[in-house]
């Protein structure tokens, strides 16, 4: 069965410090991968997605970046965190089965990031 | 314009009763998929149920069913026999056919459901 691991679960960082959040998927190959951010009590904002190794699409201009160095690894980074980067970050994967609309995205447990 | 609208920010339901969470959507694609997710206070997003635009039957998964009214562009989630563990935030999401390769989902703003004992 497929599993998704996301770490760390919580992170407290000072303004201006770097960031690296990691997400790995097991039990599948060549998945689509996604990074979302969620403000408290709000909906999900898609930040980045990737359909393959080295292929990153950005949805929202910001000081975050993403990389996919391996097939099942997705990394969210920042060189200098801002207060506005606080939030709940979720990684998700989706199997590439067929060309339809029916595959759900499956989410990790998330990282709660607080910027001080 | 909002593509997914969940008009109920918060709802209460008595334990063991049924509850309907509303979702309306807007798309010009003929083929699309609709998804519901549950997010407990711990934060993980749990996939509940899927409805395809060409599905003739309403989707059901255990206590979850989807009241799909295509002409009205609504895909309401019905939870039967509510349990205390159903207390969570619920999100409706859509994937349009134009996004089938990227897999991108459009999410609503969510509805917080509280089940009363």
Image (tube, grey):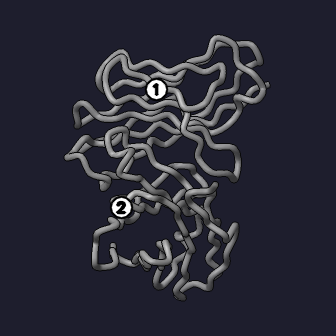
Q: Name which residue lies at 70% across and 28% down.
A: A85
Most foreground residue, B114 or B69: B69
- In which chain is the residue bearing label 2? B
Residue A6, compared with residue B63, is above or below; it is: above
**B61 left or right of A36?**
left
Residue A45, compared with residue B14, is above or below; it is: above
Q: Give the numbered dot on residue B30.
A: 2
Q: Quadrant of residue B47?
A: bottom left
Say which residue label 1 marks: A57
Q: Name which residue lies at 40% across and 63% down.
A: B48
Indicate the quadrant containing the C terminus of chain B: top left, top right, bottom left or bottom right.
Answer: bottom right
Instruction: Look at the numbered disc 2 and give the secondary structure of its residue.
Output: loop
Mark 2 surroundings within 10 Å by alpha-carbon count, few (fewer than 14), some (14 through 19), many (20 or more): few
Indicate the quadrant containing the N terminus of chain B: top left, top right, bottom left or bottom right.
Answer: bottom right
Q: Residue B59, position in %: x, y?
A: 33, 74
Instruction: Look at the numbered disc 1 and give the secondary structure of its residue.
Output: strand
Most foreground residue, B97 or B88: B97
**A41 left or right of A107?**
right
Most foreground residue, A107 or B4: B4
Q: Residue B45, position in %: x, y?
A: 49, 52
- In which chain is the residue bearing label 1? A
Q: Name which residue lies at 21% across and 45% down.
A: A97
Q: Nearer the viewer, mark 2 or mark 1?
A: 2
Q: Residue furthest bottom?
A: B17
Real-space CA distance between mark 2 and mark 1, rounded to the nearest whole angstrom: 25 Å
Do discs 2 and 1 share a chain?
A: no
**A113 left or right of B78?**
right
Q: Quadrant of residue B53?
A: bottom left
């Amino acid at each position: 069965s497929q599993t998704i691991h996301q770490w760390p679960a919580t992170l407290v960082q000072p303004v201006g410090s770097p960031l690296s959040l990691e997400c790995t998927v097991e039990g599948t190959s060549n998945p689509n991968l996604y990074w979302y951010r969620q403000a408290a009590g709000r909906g999900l904002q898609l930040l980045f997605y990737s359909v393959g190794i080295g292929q990153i699409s950005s949805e929202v201009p910001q000081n975050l970046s993403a990389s996919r160095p391996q097939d099942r690894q997705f990394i969210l980074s920042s060189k200098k965190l801002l207060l506005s980067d606080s939030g709940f970050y979720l990684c998700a994967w989706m199997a590439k089965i067929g060309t339809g609309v029916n595959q759900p995205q499956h989410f990790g447990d998330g990282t709660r990031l607080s910027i001080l | 314009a909002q593509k997914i609208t969940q008009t109920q920010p918060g709802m209460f339901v008595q334990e063991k009763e049924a509850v309907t969470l509303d979702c309306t959507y807007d798309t010009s694609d003929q083929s699309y998929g609709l998804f519901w997710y549950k997010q407990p206070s711990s934060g993980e997003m749990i996939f509940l149920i899927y409805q395809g635009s060409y599905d003739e039957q309403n989707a059901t998964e255990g206590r979850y069913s989807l009241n799909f009214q295509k002409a009205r562009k609504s895909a309401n989630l019905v939870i039967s026999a509510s349990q205390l563990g159903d207390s969570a935030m619920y999100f409706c999401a859509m994937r349009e056919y134009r996004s089938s390769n990227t897999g991108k989902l459009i999410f609503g703003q969510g509805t917080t459901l509280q089940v009363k004992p």
